[in-house]
Amino acid sequence: MSGALEGIKIVEISGLGPAPFAGMMLADAGADVLLIDRADKATYPPREDAHPDMLNRGRRSVAIDLKTPEGVELALDVISRADGVMEGFRPGVVERLGLGPAECLARNPKLVYGRMTGWGQDGPLAEFGGHDIDYIAVAGALEPIGRAGQAPTPPLNLVGDFGGGGMLLAFGMLAAIISAQRTGRGQVVDAAMVDGSAILMTMMHSIKNMGMWRGPRGTNILDTGAHFYEVYETADGRYMAVGAVEPKFYSNLLAVLRLDEATLPKQMDGRAWPEMKKLFASTFLSKTRDEWTQLFAEADACVVPVLSMAEAPQNAHIVHRQTFTEVSGVVQPSPAPRFSATPSSIRRPPPNPGQHGDEALAEWGFTQPEIAELRRSGAIR
């Protein structure tokens, strides 16, 4: 069975982080994503072993020298045959190469042109550099994350780069491709990590608007302020994650901890949360993580062990769901979400730069004499 995006052709100009993540999502779902890599990264003969960067899985790579007129013309020719193109450079970079939206849409009016930046294509910070931590800070997503009395805790680079970046670029590409198929008109998708980080905070803004986010960082219901939404150390130096927000889960949690609910403060009495956290902390320290895991296995209390990246693929539920898979000897997250009729798949391991030049260009409609001439001119390696 083919993936949901079978027949969709995307050109991805090689970049870092969020744009490759969007390309991975689209490729997993069945799109033919052709990766344009830098010519100076290509090796000859091309390496056949899988590249270690899993974000580039599912694609084929052609190495084009975009510093030559022939290379730019080739890139425009390839883009003219695609449904969409994605780039992740600072504003103005692709325009200077001659591959901006104006040039590409002139060749293909139905093209969807996806742009991935941190600050967006315009605004006071558009020309400045940045990283995930900067984008989520300005968007108001970093300040609430952390414990009381401590500095904000950067949540890896999951919020800006991937949740608010690559994931929203993939969504934008698909929405615009559907529109182009209906209207015959392409458009530019301006995906900015600062915008995406802000929209991920919509629920937090709602909670604040309802008057339920009252205190500073680390004192509210979902930011480790509440004793029933927290991580607790166990006797062996590992951790259990507790998320018993609803009353029934909270009652089940107390039952496993052997704490009498009738003698304790009400669950939502925020004044009692600090003392309750101390009680919970001392209780969880009485057993190992695995002992608590066994006790909570049938409790339905929203309490589970905190697993490492190495441990997660071995978890019984994760194994049952096949949440991880192995490709070319490398264990990695499986495609998500899941489709009942058009399942996603990892069609090939991550490519080395230029590994599939002849093969990919031939499938995209270039003849063998044309490919030979492109090699002779230095447009591709």
Image: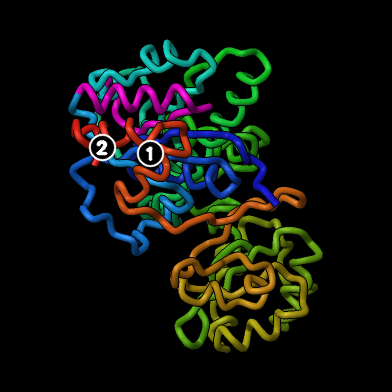
Q: Position of residue 217 (x, y in %)?
A: 47, 49
Residue at 36% over, 28% down: 119
Mark 1 packing: few (<14 Cα in 10 Å), some, or many (20+)? some
In the rendered structure, which amino acid carries the disc numbered 1? Answer: Ala
Q: Which residue is mark 2?
A: 380
Q: Position of residue 94 (x, y in %)?
A: 29, 23
Q: Is residue 182 left or right of residue 103?
A: right
In the structure shown, which secondary structural element does the residue marked by tag 1 occupy?
Answer: helix
Q: Is residue 76 left or right of residue 331?
A: left
Pick the front one: 198 or 341: 341
**Exactly how many numbered labels are in the figure?**
2
In the rendered structure, which amino acid carries the disc numbered 2? Answer: Ile
Magenta stretch: residue 10 in it?
A: no
Q: Nearer the viewer, mark 1 or mark 2?
A: 2
In the rendered structure, which disc, 1 or 2, sits on the residue that comes first in sequence?
A: 1
**308 vs 167: above or below:** below
Mark 2 packing: few (<14 Cα in 10 Å), some, or many (20+)? many
Q: Which mark is residue 137?
A: 1
Residue contact at pointers 1 and 2, CB within 8 angstroms: no
**118 vs 113: above or below:** below
In the structure shown, which secondary structural element does the residue marked by tag 2 occupy?
Answer: loop
Q: Position of residue 72 (x, y in %)?
A: 27, 24
Look at the image and give the residue range highlighted in magenta. Answer: 69-92
Q: Position of residue 88 (x, y in %)?
A: 35, 33
| Residue 143 seen | no
Q: CA distance from mark 1 to mark 2?
A: 41 Å
Residue at 33% over, 41% down: 62
In the image, farthest residue toward the front:
369
Residue at 42% over, 47% down: 60
Pick the front one: 160 or 293: 160
Magenta stretch: residue 88 in it?
A: yes
Pick the front one: 186 or 8: 8
